[in-house]
Amino acid sequence: MAHDNHLLLIIDDEMPIRRFLRATLSAEGHRVVEADSGASGLKMAAQQPPDLVILDLGLPDMDGLEVLRRLREWLTVPVLILSARDQEQEKIEALDGGADDYLTKPFGVGELLARIRAAMRHAHQGTGATAVMAVGDLHVDLATRTVTLAGERLTLTPLEYKLLVTLMKHSGKVLTHRFLLREVWGPHATRESHYLRVFVAGLRRKLGDDPARSRYISTEQGVGYRFATE
C-alpha cells in the first residue's frame, strides 16, 4: 500500500528494534530517521518535524514520558509509544499525556502498521466531522442521534449514546478509562471507573458483542477500550 512518503521518527535505544522498524516502514514507502536517545530524538524532531513519532518509554538518558511532554509542547503529530509488558502505569500516563496509541513489545508487523494507519487517519481527519459514522453494520447518524445495527434501530440511553459516539469518533485508537470518564461523565468523574465498566457492558449487550471475542469494543487490559475500525 503506497503512502504519501511520510517522515517517521523512531526514538529507541535498542538497535534490533530500530532495524526492524526501519525495514518494515521503509518497505511501506515511509522515510525513516532514527535517534538512540531522548535528547537526540528531541533535537531531530526540532530540526525536521516528522509526520509521526515512534517513542520507546525506556530510554537510557531521560524518561520517555518527559520526552513526550517536551514533544507535545510544540508538536501535534501522532506519537506511538513502545513499552514493555510491565509498564502499564507508564502507558496510561503516556496516553493521558498526549500519546496517540501504544504497542507492547514484542509486536508484529501487522499490528504496527494498523496502529500507524489509525494514528495517521486521526491526524488527517481534522475538525470536518462527518454527520454519519459507520463501522461494519453499525451506523450512527449524529444529526438525528439515531443508531442502527444491521438496519435495526437501537434504543440507547443518553449516556450510552455519548459513550458510543466517543468510542467511534476515535475508532482504532485506545482510549484510557480516564479519558472516557472525562469525555462522557465530565471532569469530576475521572476516578469512577466502575461506572464505565457497567456502561460498556450494557453497550456491548445492545451491540450483541461477545466480550471474549468482541466485534466492536475490545478491552485493553488495565488501560482502557478500543473501538473497531471495520
Image (cartoon, grey):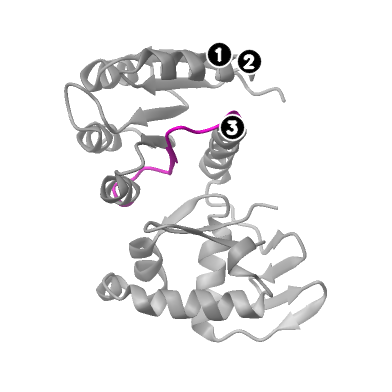
Q: Which mark is residue 9?
A: none
The quarter of the picture where residue 185 lies is bottom left
Number of numbered callouts drawn: 3
Name the residue beneath numbered marker 3: 113
**Which residue is painted at 39% across and 14% down in the image?**
34
Q: CA distance from mark 2 to mark 1?
A: 6 Å
Q: What amino acid type is highlighted by mark number 2?
A: Ala
The quarter of the picture where residue 52 lies is top left
> Does label 1 or label 3 sit earlier along the sequence?
1
Name the residue beneath numbered marker 1: 23
Name the residue beneath numbered marker 2: 27
Q: Nearer the viewer, residue 227 or 139?
A: 227
Which quadrant of the rendered structure holds the N terminus?
top right
Indicate whether residue 105 is drawn in magenta: yes
Q: Nearer the viewer, residue 185 or 215?
A: 215
**Position in image of residue 154 (x %, y %):** 70, 82
Indicate whether residue 208 is drawn in magenta: no
**Position in image of residue 225 (x %, y %):** 48, 60
Q: Name the secondary structure under disc 3.
A: helix
Mark 2 neighbour class, 10 Å CA radius: few under 14, some 14 to 19, many 20 or more = few
**For residue 203, side relative to residue 84 (left or right):** right
Whether label 2 touches label 1, CB < 8 Å: yes
The quarter of the picture where residue 112 lies is top right
- Range of the magenta residues? 96-109
**Which residue is painted at 42% across and 34% down in the image?**
105
Residue 130 in the image: above or below residue 119: below
Mark 3 neighbour class, 10 Å CA radius: few under 14, some 14 to 19, many 20 or more = some
Mark 1 neighbour class, 10 Å CA radius: few under 14, some 14 to 19, many 20 or more = few
